[in-house]
């Protein structure tokens, strides 16, 4: 009989996404209510302004989700990643893998409560953002700290793994397969990362450096000569990291580039940024500029990604002596 005290929980932390069109507005409200990613005036005004912004943006964002099936696929994909990781970890110990989403269900607080109720005494929190930023991993870990406070649970965290060899190998594999889809193999690789306001970098956030280190490692592993980095999903009047992915595509067109492979470098699964922004919005832009734009497949349940997550968890387990 298994000793429940010996079971180690693994909590995969991710952004989350609306699981229906009706969920778009509350999802956006939760997102804009987070002062760690955006400060909407004085603290007392954060939630009223988040409500106003989410109300104004909902009709437009709903149309985007309608184009990709009426919801985000991130929950199903993260569940598949969790199942694959749990199966891989079972070969090396008694593990149970849970999912905690920052802005939609299943919420971090609910999953921590579920772990406690199931008898788990200790767990490892693993961010599914490979590159650290306070606006992603930092926010999720702060919420975890808040909801775990006072509970009889021991836990430790993994904050970034942007150059893990198996992760780099997984990305390199998708890049090589993507390039093979071009007839003449002469394509420019555009690594597109999620945008971040410049002020975060000025305050010491390592995200931009982590992105570059990931990309340089992937380019070396895949033997890519022509590549560049851009940033997508930039909104609002603040100064963002650049160039924007749309700007980068226009610049490539101006230099006569005809084939581009877009690689969503900061995402480990498909969601609106890949399925709508790259596949629909940027592909249409590229087509109008005479560019054949294709996208490298998202990692999703790529065996090398699951292998990387397994190795990261087992390394932390050894470090903790669990």
Image (tube, helix red, strand yellow):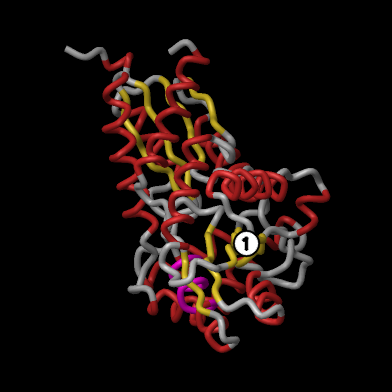
Please tell me how many numbered marks the rendered image carries.
1
- Foreground pick, 293 / 153: 293
Q: Position of residue 58 (x, y in %)?
A: 50, 76
Disc 1: which residue: 47
Q: Position of residue 161 (x, y in %)?
A: 56, 36
Q: Position of residue 71 (x, y in %)?
A: 36, 68
The residue sitting at 39% across, 64% down in the picture is 72
Place residue 317 in its image quadrant.
top left
Which quarter of the rendered picture does the C terminus lie within?
Answer: top left
Q: Given the current orientation, which residue lies at the most extreme front position? A: 184
The residue sitting at 65% across, 47% down in the picture is 216
Q: Given the current orientation, which residue lies at the most extreme bottom position? A: 288
- Foreground pick, 243 / 148: 243
- Foreground pick, 184 / 279: 184
Disc 1: CA contacts within 10 A as few (<14), some (14-19) or many (>=20): some
The residue sitting at 53% across, 37% down in the picture is 144
* Residue 139 at least partly seen: no
Which quarter of the rendered picture does the N terminus lie within?
Answer: top left
Q: Secondary structure at mark 1?
A: helix
Tell me: residue 146, above or below residue 105.
Answer: above
Q: Is residue 276 magenta?
A: yes
Q: Position of residue 47 (x, y in %)?
A: 62, 61
The residue sitting at 67% across, 53% down in the picture is 35
Instruction: Give left or right: position of 5 versus 253.
Output: left
Chief secondary structure of the magenta span?
helix
* Residue 59 at least partly seen: yes
- Foreground pick, 101 / 153: 101
The boundaries of the magenta stretch are 273-282
């Amino acid at each position: 009989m298994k000793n429940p005290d010996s079971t180690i929980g693994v909590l995969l932390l991710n952004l989350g996404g609306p699981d229906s069109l009706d969920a778009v507005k509350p999802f956006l409200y939760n997102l804009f209510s987070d002062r760690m990613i955006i400060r909407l005036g004085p603290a007392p005004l954060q939630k009223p302004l988040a409500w106003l912004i989410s109300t104004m943006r909902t009709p437009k964002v709903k149309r985007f989700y309608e184009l990709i099936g009426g919801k985000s696929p991130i929950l199903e994909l993260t569940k598949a990643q969790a199942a694959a990781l749990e199966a891989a970890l079972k070969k090396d110990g008694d593990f149970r893998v849970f999912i905690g989403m920052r802005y939609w269900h299943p919420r971090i607080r609910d999953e921590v409560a579920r772990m406690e109720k199931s008898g788990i005494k200790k767990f490892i929190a693993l961010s599914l953002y490979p590159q650290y930023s306070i606006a992603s991993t930092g926010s999720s870990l702060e919420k975890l700290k808040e909801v775990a406070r006072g509970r009889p649970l021991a836990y430790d965290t993994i904050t970034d793994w942007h150059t893990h060899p198996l992760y780099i190998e997984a990305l390199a594999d998708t890049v090589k397969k993507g390039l093979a889809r071009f007839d003449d193999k002469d394509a420019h690789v555009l690594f597109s990362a999620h945008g971040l306001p410049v002020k975060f970098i000025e305050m010491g956030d390592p995200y931009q450096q982590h992105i570059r280190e990931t990309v340089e490692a992937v380019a070396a592993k895949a033997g890519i000569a022509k590549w560049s980095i851009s940033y997508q999903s930039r909104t609002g009047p603040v100064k963002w990291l650049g160039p924007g992915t749309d700007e980068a595509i226009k610049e490539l067109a101006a230099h006569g580039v005809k084939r581009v492979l877009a690689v969503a470098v900061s995402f480990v699964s498909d969601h609106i940024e890949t399925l709508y922004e790259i596949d629909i919005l940027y592909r249409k832009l590229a087509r109008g500029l005479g560019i054949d734009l294709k996208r490298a497949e998202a990692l999703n349940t790529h065996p090398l990604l699951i292998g990387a997550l397994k190795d990261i968890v087992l390394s932390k387990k050894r470090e903790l002596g669990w």
